[in-house]
Amino acid sequence: MTDDYSPAGTITTKLEDALGWARKYSLWPYPFVTACCGMEYMSVSASHYDLDRFGAAFPRFSPRQADVLMVVGTVSHKIAPVLRRIYDQMASPKWVIAFGVCTCTGGFYNDYSTVQGIDTILPVDLYIPGCPPRPETVIQGIMLLQEKIQKMGGKLG
Amino acid sequence: MTAMVWDVRRVEPGEPAFELLKKLKEDGYNVLVDFTAVDYSAWGKGPKGDETDDLKRAVPTEAHNLVHEIASARGEEYGTPHLPGKDTLTEGLPAPRKERFEVVWRLMKLDPETGDDRGRAAVYAAFDEEPPVLRSAASLWPVADWLEREVWDMFGIRFVDRPDIKRLLLYEEFKGHPLRKDYPITRRQPLIGPKAGEPAGNPSFNHLEPTIKYE
């Protein structure tokens, strides 16, 4: 990034990289919390595990202000159109995290009421398995998503 | 603390059940704790034909065979693989019931001053689907409104004085009543996304149809 010819106190970079860097440290998640995974989400975003370290702990309760949709908990067929509508309302670039095994695959709810994985109704960027996932798993997931956002650079989601 | 004693009543559905509930309400049962139903249509009949085959196949598992191999290698006997027949799968089962459904109202005497539990009662009523016989208890305990809607939603049990009852938990587009024994266990009725029973490998599986209606 720096070289001997640049003036002191400056760095040079590509615009793509700068955009990716800026985006990955200003994630504004929209928590779509429907079930017990919500407890684990609260635990990971509270002070002990502190998602703020990753620039990713500022929950926005309006999809129009958010750029990460965190789907936390079992999604039933009844609420599936609502989830899809919230995803459609978010502005690009946007990313989706499937938090917990129910959102990834339906988990053990293979029954008349449960969506068998939210990737059947909207595109998912990151799957965090676990029932519920440990906070460490979530943090690793957030870091992987940041890596992905950095690689995307200036591209829209 | 003494063990809880339930006052269990069995009653004819319809008017006798309603009269009994009314009397219990007057006796001080001021809380309807729960109202729910059971579908007894598979009661006492044992596993279905294909399930019997599954059970037969499941018994000599790999682990079981492995134990046999080890035992014979050591020159020991380890019984014989047990293959249950139809009889062993149905013996010990209760007798089938005459009526298909049974509902239960669970009541409680709650002391409004102290919050103490002053007694419990359970009222059972068995009946067949046609014609609808049950009377709504919502005039006695308002909470019965939602509980009856749930019983309609899950079991399709109707109430004579609630002809236009609505589903409580499932969506209006849902066909059938999922907790009935004749609801196919694999039937799915998604509102958006892949249709029921479609293999995940199909190209259309992740195809998103614009089914959301925007005003």
Image (cartoon, coloured by chain):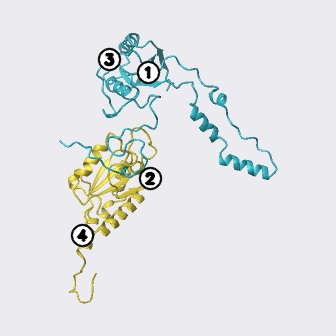
Q: Secondary structure at mark 4?
A: helix
**Callouts 3 and 4 in the same chain:** no
**Callouts 1 and 4 in the same chain:** no
Residue at position x 43%, y 21% in the image: B103
Asked whether the beta carbons under mark 3 and mark 4 sit within 8 Å of each other, the answer is no
Mark 2 to mark 1 CA distance (whole Å) = 38 Å
Is B75 located above or below residue B146 in the figure? below
Asked whether the beta carbons under mark 2 and mark 1 sit within 8 Å of each other, the answer is no
Mark 1 to mark 4 CA distance (whole Å) = 63 Å
Type of amino acid at the residue the image marks with label 2: Gly
The chain letter for the residue carrying disc 1 is: B
- The residue lying toward the viewer, choosing from B19 and B14, is B14
Q: Which residue is under mark 1?
A: B104
Q: Residues within 10 Å of mark 3 (few under 14, many from 20)?
A: some
In the figure, residue B50 lies in which quadrant?
top right
The chain letter for the residue carrying disc 4 is: A
Which hue belongs to chain B?
cyan
Is B123 located above or below residue B197 in the figure? above
Asked whether the beta carbons under mark 4 and mark 2 sit within 8 Å of each other, the answer is no
